[in-house]
Image (spheres, helix red, strand yellow):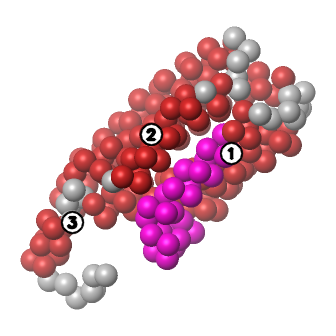
């Protein structure tokens, strides 16, 4: 761990020794793409989801995700210090995947809200750990570039999400928002990248 009394030259040496470009960029973009795309797609398909599940109030579907995400954001940093970045990121990814599976198989509103809560807890950890891992791996002078790339990924996914969500909702296939490519293809690839890198 770094001492608080480091000189600026030793801090630069630390940044140069711990600068690894590709892992932080790749993992941060993949994880951010998943989270952003899911958030924006669900909000577009929400009226159809509520109708199919015979619900009358959609507020808790979004609020449960946001509350769980906000509650776990600060705790995930502490867990990363205690258990390590990789283990905490994997747990967050698994929680997000479990929440997605529960949402995709929801038969009523309570089930959907419970799934969104678990998904939000995983999403909060993912959001926090992406920044922590980026800070660990990338030199201070290069962090702006990598944060910009992650922001660009978020923007692209946020612009694609409503189109995907609307198309799936219109076709009556909103469950695929939670279970299709997210569970089958992207989640194992992201978990493998976290394990290997």
Instruction: Identify the residue position indicated by label 1 in the image.
Output: 99
Residue 44 vs 146, above or below: the answer is above
Instruction: Identify the residue position indicated by label 2 in the image.
Output: 189
Marks 1 and 3 sit apart, C-alpha to C-alpha, by: 34 Å
Residue 104 lies left or right of residue 41; in this view the side is right
Helix, strand or loop at label 3? It is: loop
Label placed on residue 182? none
Residue at left 33%, top 43%? 26
Towards the viewer: 81 or 72: 81
Residue 17 lies left or right of residue 169; in this view the side is left
- Going from N to C along the chain, the mark reached first, 1 or 2, is 1
Q: Among all residues in the image, which is located at the extreme left?
A: 9
- What are the residue bounds of the magenta stretch? 74-100
Local crowd size for mark 3, using a 10 Å CA cut-off: few (<14), some (14–19), many (≥20): some
Residue 92 image point, x, y percent: 56, 55
Towards the viewer: 194 or 120: 194
Residue at left 37%, top 60%? 133
Helix, strand or loop at label 1? It is: helix
Residue 80 vs 121, above or below: the answer is below
Towards the viewer: 163 or 17: 17
Q: Is residue 66 visible?
A: no
- Going from N to C along the chain, the mark reached first, 1 or 3, is 3
Residue 179 vs 150, above or below: the answer is above
**91 inside magenta stretch:** yes
Instruction: Identify the residue position indicated by label 3 in the image.
Output: 18
Q: Which picture quadrant has residue 167? A: top right
């Amino acid at each position: 761990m770094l001492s608080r009394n480091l000189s600026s030259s030793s801090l630069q040496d630390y940044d140069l020794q711990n600068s690894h470009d590709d892992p932080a960029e790749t993992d941060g973009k993949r994880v951010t793409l998943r989270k952003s795309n899911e958030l924006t797609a669900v909000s577009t398909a929400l009226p159809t989801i509520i109708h199919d599940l015979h619900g009358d109030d959609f507020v808790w579907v979004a609020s449960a995700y946001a509350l769980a995400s906000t509650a776990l954001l600060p705790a995930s940093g502490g867990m990363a210090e205690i258990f390590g970045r990789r283990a905490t990121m994997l747990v967050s990814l698994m929680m997000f995947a479990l929440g997605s599976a529960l949402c995709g198989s929801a038969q009523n509103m309570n089930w959907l809200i419970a799934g969104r809560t678990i998904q939000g807890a995983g999403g909060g950890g993912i959001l926090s750990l992406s920044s922590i891992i980026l800070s660990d791996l990338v030199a201070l002078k290069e962090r702006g570039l990598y944060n910009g790339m992650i922001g660009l990924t978020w923007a692209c996914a946020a612009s694609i999400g409503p189109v995907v969500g609307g198309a799936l909702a219109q076709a009556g296939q909103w469950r695929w928002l939670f279970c299709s490519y997210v569970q089958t293809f992207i989640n194992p690839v992201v978990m493998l990248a976290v394990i290997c890198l």
